[in-house]
Amino acid sequence: MTREDFKRLAAEGLVLLDGATGTNLQKMGLVNGICPDEWILSNPEAILSLQEGYLEAGSRILYSPTFSCNRVKLAEYGLEGRIGELNEKLVGLSKKAIARFEEKHPGAGKAYVAGDVSMTGIQVKPVGPMDFEELVEIYREQIGFLAAAGADLIVVETMMSLQECRAALIAAKECCSLPVMVTMTFEENGRSLFGTDIRTALVTLEALGADAFGANCSTGPDRMKRLLDEILPIAGIPLICKPNAGMPRLDPEGNTVYDMDAREFAEHMGGIIRSGVRFVGGCCGTDAGFIAKLKENYVNSAEIDIIPAKTKEDCLFLSSERETVKICKDSPFRVVGERINPTGKKKLQAELRAGSLEMVREFARSQEEGGASVLDINMGLSGVDEAELMVRAIEAVTQETSLPLCIDSSYPEVLEKALRIYPGRALLNSISAESAHLKEKLRIAKKYGAAFILLPMGDEGLPKDFGEKKKNMETVLSEALQMGFARHDIIVDGLVGAVGALKTAGTDTLDTIRFCREEGLFTICGLSNISFGLPERIHVNAAFLSMAIREGLNLAICNPNQPELKAAYLSADLLMNRPGADLRYIEYMNEHGGELKITGEGKSRNAPEGAPAAKEPLTGLGLLKDAVVRGKKEIIGGLTEEALKNGEEAGKILNEALIPGINEVGALFDEGRYFLPQLIASAEAMELSISLLEPYLQSGGQSEKAGTVVIATVEGDVHDIGKNLVSLMLKNYGFRVIDLGKNVPGETIVDTAVKEQADIICLSALMTTTMKEMKQVIALAKERGCRALFMIGGAVITEEYQKEIGADGYAQDAAEAVRVAKRLMKQVR
């Protein structure tokens, strides 16, 4: 199947996918704790009968049973050396199911095999230990085998990390030409486990080249509809919906069941189908009866004819891993923060050469606080490896802020390395008509889904007049449109000159901005260039900014911490009657109006370094607390040793810096301002500090533990992201934690709890197929007379389920787990 074939399939109307695989194979004898891939090959009729049933019900696309058939997952069973053989044979079974069905129904229409890949369970840097390129190679290996085995397309499913989705998609594009569908799972709050919302995921993956995108697992069709409704207006690719049969629960016999039958499931799917979602099927708890009901209700009825054609919004979207910025013709004016650039900043240059990124992190934070919508990252500095430094800066900044980034470099190799690892849709700064790099930079931007700034310069350098500037624009536009860019993927640089050197510099730029607005192109400019060499520059900058916004300027690269500039663009938006501009203006003036004094301090793009906001500098324990809150793993060890050297008691450091810091992190997480990556970084930073304090705490008699906890992921479940973080957080709060790992038998958990005299047993499960193990562990503990209380959690676990199986507490996330553990300890004592 080619990508064009896939587009035609979607254009024909509703396409039915298959239903659940794992939950149905368990009913046929698959048990937890063994390799599912090997079991399927030993019991081929199980998958053949299941998939033939789906085809009989109406499925057009079968997912191959290769969900966990990557090198990392197979290594848990010692089978990584058989990866090629296993993937080939498992795809072969799905193809055999289709062949048997077509033999019985020769005129039934073509069915396809989607080679199925999913997460590895190991997090990628900077959150986890795995290099991004290693992850790409793991996916490239499996997808290569799937393509060679005859898969018609690739599906990347049940993903929690946007960066892992990117790795799989890049791998697929690099090793085959098959269409790729991607689906992610989203929590109750509408975000993935790593904090990505569905709009951000769509923006990033569509730009990167996914052929269809959507959601699967984690919830039923009623809740999934709300997610998909968010992206229907902006999606330029077909959408996918593969929900569970509602929410899981245990029946009286202890089996996991779901609260929707096929009829109710199909009724809820009606709204999703009528809204324009093209690919639908089922996940956990569904079977052939669910697919048959979808076919009966929507394929075999006239209702399918009312699916509307979707028209994508003509706007530019930029994204980080956790946030999307939308730029339309009448959007509020946006600032691209300019401060992360070593040009003219001696202190920043020295820090970068010394390997420190502290100023980079501070500039990122202060510019976000100042109102920037995007952050420009430039690491152009002599005597350093610019590409390596750019990658490190991106990793640091993406931990510090959720703002999208603008990758700023003259060198194609730097841009490629940066865009490859950037976990979102970046803005590339910039691409000119210079023949040496034009096609290569466009290729890089297209491959990694970046939007770009068009710099209207050519081989002759700066254009002599507007005619030459226009010619340069047309050269780049023509090449870009031929490569598949849309006009809204491009932002034209107005090419601001210094009015002190050229009197028409201002009017020339305004003419360019006006022309681009009339041509339907977005515009940006390096604002402070206009006042170069003049006194009291801020006044010229502010006046020019207001005039440029009136002509249609959408963004400017400038310092967002200058109140005069912010007042100028908020006022311009207000006078142009842009939506919400009145409230934004009033809110800012009520809070910051007093800062707008005539100071004469016009900061330029190359202004002296240092955050402009006049804040009291942090010292001593304040620095340590901030290091925890900001997850500064690279400096917290030095700060801890310095505090001890200066005479601070270990107990005081723990109680007045580290604990308050991690409490603040928990509060930010609860408020939805921090997400899993920041929580992990902060917890790991605190752990590093505590490891240095431990000898002093013990010698000072302050090492008494808050309680003893045994923690494990239940048997049959090999996912441990959340469990690892809960373990780390509990350790940081003074609990003695015995972490037994993942896929742990109930006997081991209970035996360890008895031996270690545990106060609490924490159980984690990510999959509906393994959650029932929790009830068995609790029953075994009671049978053995174990006194420990039980806390449970995981993606599929609910408070209702906790009560149903007799556990003592439920935690939705690591921050809540600490609170629940403290509450349970009060019961113990």
Image (spheres, rainbow, N blue to C red):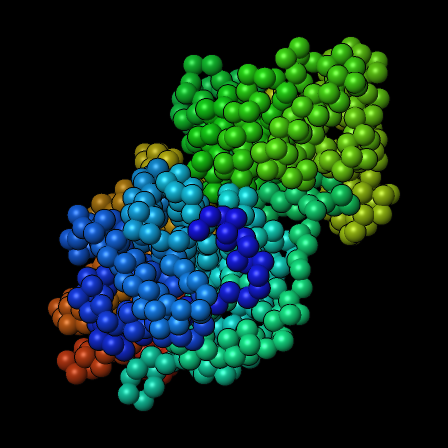
In this rendering, the answer to whether 649 lies above or below 439 is: below
Q: Residue reaching furthest front?
A: 106
Toward the bottom, the furthest residue is 252
Between 180 and 244, the residue placed more toward the observer is 180
Residue 782 placement (x, y as % from top left)? 20, 82
Q: Residue at x 81, y 47 (%)?
A: 578
**Position of 567 compared to 122: left or right?**
right
- Residue 615, horizontal then vertical, whole percent: 60, 37
| Depicted 583 relative to depicted 422: above or below | below
Q: Is residue 7 left or right of residue 531?
A: left
Name which quarter of the figure residue 270 lies in. Answer: bottom right
| Residue 513 located left or right of residue 338 | right
User: Would residue 198 be seen by someone viewing this image from the given angle?
Assistant: no
The answer to whether residue 547 is visible is: yes
What's the residue at 53%, 39% (across, down)? 449
In the image, what residue occupies the spot 37% across and 40% down? 175
Q: Nearer the viewer, residue 270 or 243?
A: 270
The spot of residue 214 in percent (x, y) is 51, 59
Q: Nearer the viewer, residue 744 or 610?
A: 744
Would you say 475 lies left or right of 129 here? right
Q: Can you give x and y, in whole percent of width and height, for residue 384 in the image?
A: 42, 18
- Say which of 768 and 63 sits in front: 63
Residue drawn 43% across the image and 14% down it: 383
Q: Quadrant of the C terminus?
A: bottom left
Q: For the view shown, which residue lies furthest in the right direction?
A: 575
The image shows a total of numbered marks equal to 0
